[in-house]
Image (spheres, grey):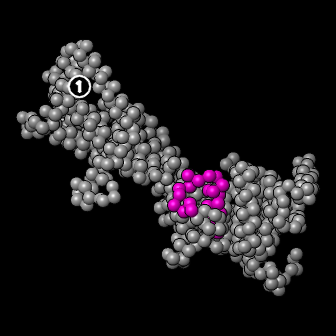
Amino acid sequence: MALKNESLGGVIRDDVVEPVLRRVRENLLQTVLPITVLLVIWGGVASYISDPGTLPGPLITFEQTYYLTFTEDPYGLTALDHVRVTFVRAIVASVLVLLLSVVFGILMAVVKPVGDSLVNFLPLGMTVPAVVIILLSLVWFGFHESGLIFAVIVAATPFGVINMWQGARDVNIGLLEMAHSFDASNRMIWRHIYIPHLLPYLFGSYRYILGMVWKVTVLGEVFGLSDGLGAMLRTHFQFGNIEIVLGYLMLFVGIVLIIEYVFLKPLEDHLFRWRT
Amino acid sequence: MVNRTIASEGDDLMSIHVTNLSKTFTEDEGEELVVLDDIDVTVGDGEFYTVMGPSGCGKSTLLNILAGTIPMDRGEIEYAGSPISPTDLPVGYVFQEPRLLNWRTVGENVDLVLRERDLSKSQREERIVDVLEMVGLHDERESYPLRLSGGMRQRVGIARALAVDPSILLMDEPFSSLDELTARNLRDDLLDLWKSTEKTIIFVTHDISEAVYLSESVTFLDTRGRIFHQSEIEHDRPREPDDPALLETEAALMKTFFDHMATIQSV
């Protein structure tokens, strides 16, 4: 670590790969063991059923994932391309959801009438089944990306808003009093009290939002789009290619885990290093 | 007291005079709650002045008014011989809980109250080093508050208040949530600080032994928001916490307190 390689590859190795490997080493029991157990059970059940059309084993599935990742379909797209399409939709949607959540969450906490009226509508938004939102939105906005993203925003925003609202209400009055007694300006109070206080809620909300957004995006693709992970799942499910469905799923799970462990977790550890 | 000519008394040049101070809170149900009812307070320059009283009697409200965080309904404050708005009083505030920003290091917590003052970077740096040294925490500058003990966190709170170099230190039950052993250490350190910095301290507590051990003067507030007794504590320093003479003073003050509470409750 002392001699840091300054090339891009070196930076990635030092700043991304190293921490991830360290985390894996430190949490060997929590990471490798459960995955191994899961794979063993999966393999056991698959060989007991011994019907790859119902439950292909892990080996066939991973072979399939490898094959799908590097082979183009009739439209010239690999599985990686489809997952990328889904990924971009999910990121765009989740960032929009997060922005809306922050704005409305804070607004609800700061402007009492807004809070009082929205609080009655949020549970409504949270209980309408995502499927209904997706179908209606696709009918209204057409069976393409914009309809899908609209549906995702409608389905996920209420959850994010609730979370941010609670965070904004939880700000420690004592700290604000302290700041005032030392004549701190509003700018100081936002920068050093409100924002650092809200940051953990922002992270928590984003995790939650992202989880919702993945599901709703894929579901929307299943119902109404011709590309993306959901569309592929639909096509291959219709033809009864369960091993391809699972192959796609594994690729998807892999990418979600990479996002979590390579981006979100290290960023979180760095931002919240003040916690014991 | 009324005829006192402040300017002629060299000693009292920087004293604080509060007159006819009143504060009423309106509760959610519309009920009016009088927390400070026409009180007069005089604190001499460099005095260790303690306000004693039961919970909910308006002790903290008095400090908050002096700190300029809540407005008073009525009253005048005079400092160094001229009327002053409480927001302009040169105070540093130490709270019951440390009220630190847990996401900033000890040094950054102190620096925070210095940033918007007219100080150069090196002056700020000097202050931070100074005050952390004063409270014995120079080694913890880079630590985050949550890694410190309760006593150490309270020391950071004191360092932060000292950093703005106030003439007046406001302290709101600063040791009441610490264990007795830690509290004793901090009280002694506070007395050393008081002696070496010659700051005026306005200290609020509900602990009579603490009041008698620390103060030069103790003022009693009751639950109606009125001052009903004031006492000079004339024991020699350094004092011993368990000195029988101090205990006697405590007992006498407690009797005054309970007698008074009985009379206002029987009315």
Q: In this view of the protein, which residue sits in the foreground, A149 or A50?
A: A50
The residue at the point 75 percent across, 66 percent down is B191
Whether residue B152 appears in magenta in the rendering, the answer is yes
Compared across the picture, whether B4 is left or right of B88 comes to right
Circle 1 packing at 10 Å, graded few (<14), some (14-19), many (20+), is many
> Where is mark 1, residue-wise?
A58
Percent position of residue B245, x then y: 92, 59
Compared across the picture, whether A175 is left or right of A205 comes to right
Tag 1, which secondary structure?
A: helix
Percent position of residue A146, x then y: 23, 44
Q: In this view of the protein, which residue sits in the foreground, B99 or B214?
A: B214
The residue at the point 19 percent across, 23 percent down is A242
The residue at the point 56 percent across, 62 percent down is B139
The residue at the point 47 percent across, 55 percent down is A196
Name the chief secondary structure element in magenta.
Answer: helix
Across the whole image, how many numbered discs are drawn on residues? Answer: 1
Percent position of residue B145, x then y: 56, 55
Residue type at mark 1 is Pro
User: What residue range appears in magenta?
Assistant: B139-162
Which chain contains the residue that carries disc 1? A
Q: In this view of the protein, which residue sits in the foreground, A72 or B212?
A: B212
Percent position of residue A69, x then y: 15, 37
The quarter of the displayed image where residue B156 is located: bottom right
The quarter of the displayed image where residue B65 is located: bottom right
